[in-house]
Amino acid sequence: MKLAVWMLCALTAAAATFDGRQPQLASRGGLTALTFGAGNAIYFASSGDGGKNWSQAVKIAEAGVLSLGMHRGPRIVIGSGVIVISAVAGRKGRGQDGDLRTWRSLDGGKTWSPGPQVNDAPASAREGLHAMAAGPGNRLFAVWLDDREGKKALYGAASGDGGASWKNQRMYRPSGGSICECCHPSVMFGSNGQIYAMFRNSLGGFRDLYLMTSTNSGRSFSQQKLGEGAWKLDACPMDGGGLVVDGAGVRTVWRRGDTVYEARPGKPEREIAKGKNPTAAGSWTAWTSGEDFYVAKSGSAARNNKGAYPALVDAGEGRAILAYEVEGRIITDTLE
């Protein structure tokens, strides 16, 4: 494992701030979209100039008891002519119940209407951890930690109509056991429509990251462990990592112990830095350490700032848009 040495410098001034928690970003065709939670409400804002200026945040829904915090919260994707926001919410919440619900906009975020529930077994998404990705056309894919079998399994659902309908399937659960109980999954589409999903497994006491790959629109998946090392831990670290599909294939970032690593399937991991909660987009990687978070572009110095739970989206030409949480506010920035 090769240690990457990062120099530190401060981030520039933020572009916009919103009251809320757990931001998530999406970008497609010149539109950048932001979603986040505040209390039990879900909010949306957009930018048409690469994150330099943002619309006012609008509340799209009150979602019962919304799962929020520790990587829980709404997710957002942009399809062809549709924006979809997903979130886990229930009547009781707090892990007692929860369904993966959706809201859709067909006019660029001006108006919203409820979409279908994604999980087809009631309350099975009560852990509150999920991810969603948009692919070619109006293909979408969602993944979540599911409890319908009594032990945590990775479930997925495919949509070919921009989230107007979903088809569930169990993607993985170890025989007689459970995947890691509260580490969030990730999902991305490849350029040829492949689906990649990453999750933390729990096998024989080892809590390592695995990559699932489908080349047939999600009907079946193969799996492989990421990296050469292993992490034996009698607990869930509540840290799922990040997933990128780029010109070289799949790039993953994740935590083992007190260290953040980068790995490509079938290759040794590379140590990035001490930290946790990593995520990635394009050539950028972000992670937290203490009360700070750090962002770094491949081959460049890392930048640090106060805050937590950074979210990134690729803005093209080596740029990225950043959103993060600090003291109950969402702050956005552009990275070049």
Image (cartoon, rainbow, N blue to C red):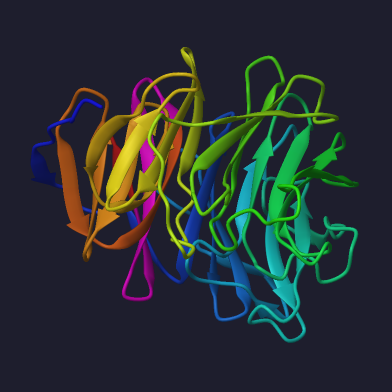
Q: Where is 83 relative to 192, above or below?
A: below
Looking at the image, can residue 266 be seen?
Answer: yes
Query: Is 92 placed above or below 207 here?
Result: below
Q: Is residue 64 left or right of residue 181?
A: right
Residue 61 horizontal/vertical position (percent): 70, 71
Tag count in the figure?
0
**Closest to the observer: 238 or 228?**
228
Q: What residue range appears in magenta? A: 315-332
Task: Name the quarter where the C terminus is drawn.
Answer: top left
In the picture, measured across the screen, residue 171 lies left or right of residue 264, that is right
Quarter of the image holding residue 101? bottom right
Q: Nearest the camera: 174 or 294? A: 174
Q: Is residue 325 left or right of residue 137?
A: left
**At which x and y percent is residue 44?**
58, 59
The answer to which image quadrant residue 62 occupies is bottom right
Q: At x 63% / y 22%, what residue is drawn?
A: 190
Residue 317 inside the magenta-drawn segment:
yes
Helix, strand or loop: magenta stretch: strand
* Quadrant of the frame with the N terminus: top left
Which percent across, then down, holds residue 60?
A: 68, 67
Q: Decide if residue 12 is in sight here.
A: no
Q: What residue occupies the far bottom of the structure in this picture?
A: 92
Does the magenta run of residues contain 5?
no
Tell me which residue sits at (43%, 58%) in the image.
233
Q: Is residue 258 above or below residue 62?
A: above
Of residue 55 and residue 294, the one placed in the foreground of this image is: 294
